[in-house]
Amino acid sequence: MRVTVISTVLNEGESVRRLMDSLVAQTRPADEVVIVDGGSRDNTVAVLSEYGGRLPLKVLVEPGANISRGRNVAVQAAGGDLFTCADAGEWLEPGWLECLLAPFENPPSGEPSDRWGGGRPQAVAGFFVPDVASPFEIAIGATVLPALAEVNPATFLPSSRSVAFTRAAWQAAGGYPEWIDYCEDLIFDLRVRAACGPFGWAPGALAHFRPRGSLRAFFKQYYRYARGDGKADLWRKRHAIRYATYLVALPAMLALSVSRSPLWLLALGSGFLAYCRTPYRRLLPYLPHLATSGRLRAILLIPLIRVTGDVAKMLGYPAGWAWRIRNWRRAEVHWQQAEPGAPGVR
């Protein structure tokens, strides 16, 4: 199989070296690496060019391209029929590519869910873990990122930080959705799964990435994620539960506190346990590696990070829906109603 690694970059500068060095170190080298630059104003393209002698590298400059457009351009420019996707700024385990390819090269046979014959998947999900250095980054990772043990491979929708797919799957999904700026990989995943069946699972294909380093950057990131959810009409139930929690359950608890009812303490304790139990469970493995002050900071930061993320989502989601209403006549916003797949892609 001819395997192409694709990625998009924009003003990554020196941070892109982490990705490039890890691609050089792969135990199974890529046959081709295609990177699309969205019009960087720094030295990103110059840094990438330094790797031309160490990787089978092709760098394309597409000013103004968003992430989806960049990935689609990379697929169209590639010569093979199997693609793996990574993000700039992250670094990949040496066996990342080898693990991602294993389900294609040694597929389980005769699985009932296989729609393409021979048990071979058309897409494979890798995994990603936070590359953390500070108590704040540890707290963010514990709050928002699933642990490997929490993943159900049958339903997991991979981030395009670590994923592989065939050209046929990309065609069946209609490519990455260029009309949306965030949540593009979720839409792509859902379309691939609808057209091609479940993703294969490669938990050893690990990508390491740095979480946001400040509350402001984290707020901006999750505001954009939720705005993308609203634009694409994703996760209505999840967002409804969040609004109900903050606009109904929280005021009810405050009313109990004013009335001095003993139910207040029970409601408060139960609510806090439900709110922070999973992040604190994820935090436990990190605590032995932190100083006492770092442990306390990480513990105290988790509720603050949760609230910050929830507020960002509650503001971003209606902003996305406002955009969706303004663009209601555009066919692409009704992507969930479109028939997945295309004739002849097999």
Image (cartoon, rainbow, N blue to C red):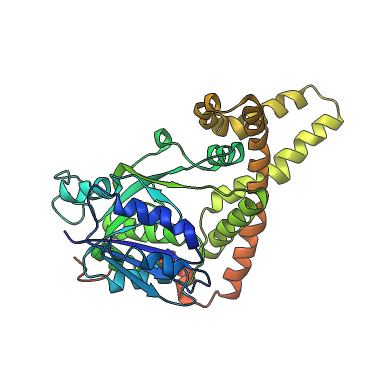
Residue 10 visible in the current orientation: yes
Residue 255, image x and y in percent? 82, 35
User: How many labels were placed on the picture?
Assistant: 0
Residue 338 visible in the current orientation: no
**Which residue is drawn at the image coordinates 37% and 68% (left, top)?**
49
| Residue at the extreme top of the image, as rendered | 262
**Which residue is drawn at the image coordinates 55% and 37% (left, top)?**
138
Q: Nearer the viewer, residue 62 or 233?
A: 62
Q: Nearer the viewer, residue 8 or 316?
A: 8
Residue 164, image x and y in percent? 30, 55
Please state if 299 lies on the left or on the right of 112 as rendered.
Answer: right
**Which residue is drawn at the image coordinates 48% and 56% (left, top)?**
15
Please state if 271 lies on the left or on the right of 85 as rendered.
Answer: right
Classify the position of the C terminus by image quarter: bottom left
Q: Quadrant of residue 191?
A: bottom left
Instruction: Examine the rendered structure and indicate whether residue 249 appears above or below residue 75.
Output: above
Q: Nearer the viewer, residue 46 or 304?
A: 46
Residue 290, image x and y in percent? 57, 28
**Which residue is drawn at the image coordinates 43% and 70% (left, top)?**
45
Residue 92, image x and y in percent? 36, 48
Classify the position of the N terminus by image quarter: bottom left
